[in-house]
Image (cartoon, grey):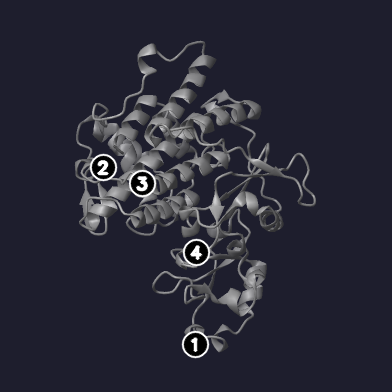
Amino acid sequence: MADREPNLPETNLSEPGLGESQPLHIPEGINYECTGCGRCCSGWAVPMTAADYERISAVDWGSLHEKLNGADLFRELKDHEKEGSPYTHAIKPDEEGLCPFLVNNLCFIHSSFESKTKPSICQLFPYNFNETPSGFYSTVSFVSVGAVLNAGKPLTEQRDYLNQKFAEFKKMYPDHHPNWSKVELCKEVPLTWERYLEIEAELLRILQNDSESLEMRLAHMSLFVVGEYLKGRGSNIPEAQLKIELGPKHQLKPIEHVLLKELYRLYFPEKTLNRAESNFSASKFMQSSMAAKMGIAPQLKLRAGDKSFNLADVKAVTLPDVPELKDIFYRFIYQRIFGKLYFGAGFGQLSLMVGLHHLITAYSLWVLQCKAAALGRGVFIVAPEDIVNTGRMLEKRLGDMTFDGYAAGALEMELQSHGRVLRFLSMCL
């Protein structure tokens, strides 16, 4: 098979006020349009700015639809929820976890008035705009089913609309400027932005070579970044490690079960996590690590409903070799890298190496959870719906994640190893 056509970013400077210092980069090969499924409007309390709340709460919604008559629709955010955000209130989900304004799978606010009446975040969704030293990078959130399925027109054919959304984003977040002042190849190894872009270009080149499995491409991406680190120290990757093989010979170590258990808890939780539960617990991880060294730490268990499975169980499940399904995983990885949403200010201020290895770890857990979801239904082949549902959950949890200094430090220690990445990827096979 030939390599994919290079997905180089397009740059659009037509938006008034944009200059060479703030280009908008649009990814190739990414499509989007709303599928009208209504599933994006569930599972969270939609936050509102003060202007959103004033505009929407002023309407007598009960007089417009009986479903909303007497409903308790809004709540004020707590102080910690307001901190560092433009939001003051939220729309309260109904008993089924759905937005109360969802009527017949359509937004009742939008259908009753116009798009501009909706909360600002709903007007922007699912478009993301990440500011970096080389401009803004647009992506679409995998929380949206349409984004997961790559439905609709290419983003490169929606330039005018993206410019409009970009302008709305800047108006909504005028003071939001991510801190990219400390970009690192790995901890305490600084990296210029220009050199980062060169490394990213090679990562994308490797990723787009679909003559190899996605697992092999990710393994080669890890090897490349580790090689860059070693070259900076005046050494090279040992000859014996240049040939990558994935498979049963790569068995997880006890400490790796502990690490995966903590990340799995965060990314595929059994219940909604509160604020205290939403961070990687470095102290809990360290305690469990000590237990692992004594041989008493439990192994990773995967859950689907009220059932749980071990790694041997999910090994029996097949992920269909269907290009459209494999492309979902590819686009998730591609957008995270293109959008700079996996390291530095794009994700937890992690170094490039550890950010990439964390992304690969998240992918590996996603594949395992797809297989667990199939087993939970009593079948041994992953269905498209398993990939969509688990991918949406992972995307949402990555967006909700916060790493404090202790958590980031723990990940920097535990996710530098290329060998560890090979063991994680081998779980997927």
Q: Which mark is residue 35?
A: 4
Quadrant occupied by the N terminus: top left
Q: Looking at the image, is 39 positioned above or below residue 216?
A: below
Viewer-nearest residue: 140 or 400: 140
> Which mark's residue is nearer the viewer, 1 or 2?
1
Residue located at (77% from left, 39% from top): 20
For residue 282, above or below residue 278: above
340 in relation to 93, above or below: above
The span from disc 1 to disc 3 (Cα, nearest Å) is: 45 Å
Q: Which mark is residue 322?
A: 3
Q: Which residue is mark 1?
A: 66
Q: Nearer the viewer, residue 293 or 383?
A: 383
> Which amino acid type is shown beneath numbered disc 4?
Thr
Q: Earlier in the sequence, mark 4 or mark 2?
A: 4
Along the horizontal axis of the image, is 312 left or right of 242?
Answer: left
Is residue 100 visible to the viewer in this orientation of the structure?
Answer: yes
Q: Are marks 4 and 3 in contact (CB under 8 Å)?
A: no
Question: Which circle, 4 or 3, is nearer the viewer?
Answer: 3
Specify which label sits upstream in the sequence, 4 or 1.
Answer: 4
Q: Secondary structure at mark 1?
A: helix
